Image (cartoon, helix red, strand yellow):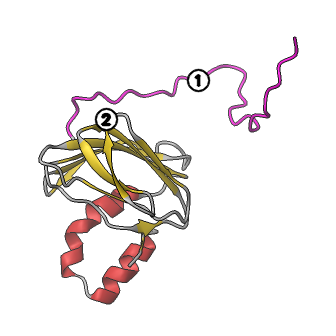
Amino acid sequence: MSLVVPPYPPPRYTKDEPGISAWLKRADEPPDYETGGVKYHYLANDQATGGDYGLYRVDIPAGGGGPGPHFHRAMSEAFFVLSGTMKLYDGTQWADGRQGDFLYVPPGGVHGFRNGADEPASILMLFAPGAPRETYFEGFAALADMTDDERREWFVLHDNYWVQ
């Protein structure tokens, strides 16, 4: 029997011996950042993954909102609903995303998400390749003090392009 295996990428680890480089982040650790009741857990940011990806758990309170339709030019984004109900926008319609539901958005794909429900929700957000999303999450507080032009520039610097 012959197995057909698609080609794998070239090796990135080339040492003879395996390395000790894994890390464990416990579920009960406090969030890395919190604002407006939204808790951000930086599970594996782009610095930790060498730019491969960024993975974040975001806990959003009941009625906690979220961004409207937008897209990214430099990265894909994916959402996995851990608990609660999230409104997920796939570029054509808003749909209820429930526990276990997944939304993948390639670069350039219009998307949005929000918690408009009467209960909290938690999601995993994956960005690939990795980008410094921590500065994006932590920069929301400064938006109110920016001019419209500064705000537009800030979003572009963070690879966020709003769709009307």
* Residue 140, image x, y percentages: 25, 67
**Which label sits on residue 111?**
none
* Residue 160, image x, y percentages: 42, 69
Q: CA distance from mark 2 to mark 1?
A: 35 Å
Vertical placement of 40 versus 3: above or below?
below
Q: Residue at x 73, y 21 (%)?
A: 16
Residue type marked 1: Gly
* Residue 161, image x, y percentages: 44, 73
Q: Tag 1, which secondary structure?
A: loop
**Main SS, magenta residues:** loop
Vertical placement of 65 versus 81: above or below?
below
Can residue 154 be found in the magenta stretch?
A: no
Q: Residue at x 28, y 66 (%)?
A: 139
Nearer the observer, 12 or 90: 90
The magenta span reads: 1-30
* Residue 29, image x, y percentages: 23, 32
Residue wearing tag 2: 99
Q: Residue at x 87, y 16 (%)?
A: 2
- If the image is split into quadrants, where does the C terminus sit? bottom left
Q: Tag 2, which secondary structure?
A: loop
Task: Give the quadrant of residue 18.
Answer: top right
Residue lying at the far right of the rendered structure: 2
Residue wearing tag 1: 19
Vertical placement of 37 versus 101: above or below?
below
